[in-house]
Amino acid sequence: MSIEAIIFYILFIDAISANLMVRFGSEWYVRHFRTISRWFPPAEGWALYYLALILWVGSLLYRAGTLF
């Protein structure tokens, strides 16, 4: 497994967790991370955009043959 694939999987897990946090845990995030939530508020649009970019990079890696 290449370093690109490892980085992709780490970012993919991060994008999925960001989307889950925005959908189901935004109140928990704001309550427990008050300072950070002021700078980085949970936003659905940015989380979806982040997931779309990661999936696009994954498709490029799959086409290049370095994903599996």
Image (tube, helix red, strand yellow):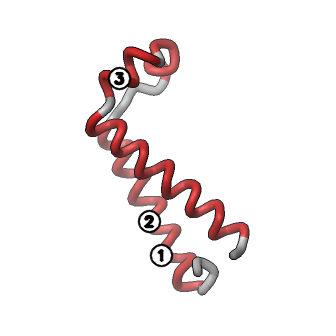
* Above or below for 2 versus 50: below
Q: CA distance from mark 3 to mark 1?
A: 33 Å
Whether residue 58 sits left or right of residue 25 in the image: it is right
* Residue located at (72% from left, 67% from top): 3
Identify the residue under disc 3. Answer: 28
Residue 6 is left or right of residue 38, and the answer is right
Q: Are marks 1 and 2 in contact (CB under 8 Å)?
A: yes
Secondary structure under the numbered disc 1 in the rendered image: helix
Label 2: how many Cα within 10 Å (few below 14, some 14–19, many 20+): some
- The local crowd at label 3, few if under 14, some if 14 to 19, many if 20 or more residues have their Cα within 10 Å, is few
Instruction: Residue type at mark 3: give it.
Output: Trp
Residue at 27% over, 36% down: 24
Disc 3 and disc 2 in contact, CB within 8 angstroms: no
Q: Amino acid at mark 1?
A: Ser
Q: As drawn, which residue projects farthest toward the left? A: 23
Spot occupied by residue 61 in the image (x, y as percentages of width and height) = 57, 76
Are dots 3 and 1 in contact, CB under 8 Å?
no
Q: Which residue is mark 1?
A: 59
Task: Specify which label sits upstream in the sequence, 3 or 2.
Answer: 3
Q: CA distance from mark 3 to mark 2?
A: 27 Å
Residue 17: mark in rendering: none
Q: Nearer the viewer, residue 40 or 24?
A: 24
For disc 2, the marked residue is 55
Residue depicted at 65% across the width and 64% down the height: 6
Amino acid at circle 2: Leu
Which residue lies at the image location 51% right of the left edge and 13% below the top edge?
Answer: 35
Percent x, y of residue 8: 58, 63
**In which quadrant is the N terminus drawn?**
bottom right
Is 28 left, or right, of 13 in this rendering? Answer: left
